[in-house]
Amino acid sequence: GEPRPLYRELPPIRGGTKTEVEKLKKLLDDATLRERDVLKRLRESE
């Protein structure tokens, strides 16, 4: 039963990194959307 505790500690770490990656991806998506909106407004104002 010793290996089990070690294995139990691994998933949270993986989940943590996964959430960090997803957070970064979301931030990137938001940034790209914002950039698109800005470009759109610039084109419309011309």
Image (cartoon, rainbow, N blue to C red):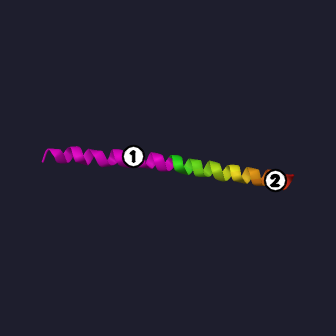
Q: Is residue 10 magenta?
A: yes
What number is the disc on residue 16? Answer: 1
| Residue topped by disc 2 | 43
Front one among 34 and 39: 39
**Picture coordinates of residue 7, whole percent (x, y):** 23, 47
What number is the disc on residue 24? Answer: none
**Picture coordinates of residue 8, whole percent (x, y):** 25, 48
Q: Secondary structure at mark 1?
A: helix
Which is nearer the N-term, disc 1 or disc 2?
Answer: 1
For image coordinates 46% across by 45% down, the residue present is 20
**Picture coordinates of residue 25, whole percent (x, y):** 53, 49
Look at discs 1 and 2 and give the one toward the viewer: 2
Q: Is residue 25 magenta?
A: no
What segment is highlighted magenta in the picture? 1-23
For image coordinates 22% across by 43% down, the residue present is 6
Q: Secondary structure at mark 2?
A: helix
Q: Is residue 45 left or right of residue 25?
A: right
State how far apart marks 1 and 2 are (Cα): 41 Å
Q: Around disc 2, counting alpha carbons within 10 Å, would you say few (fewer than 14), some (14 to 19), or many (20 or more)?
A: few
Q: Amino acid at mark 1?
A: Gly
Q: Around disc 1, counting alpha carbons within 10 Å, would you say few (fewer than 14), some (14 to 19), or many (20 or more)?
A: few
Report the label total: 2
For the stretch drawn in magenta, what is the main secondary structure?
Answer: helix
For image coordinates 12% across by 48% down, the residue present is 1
Going by the picture, which residue comes out furthest to the right?
46
**Picture coordinates of residue 24, whole percent (x, y):** 52, 46
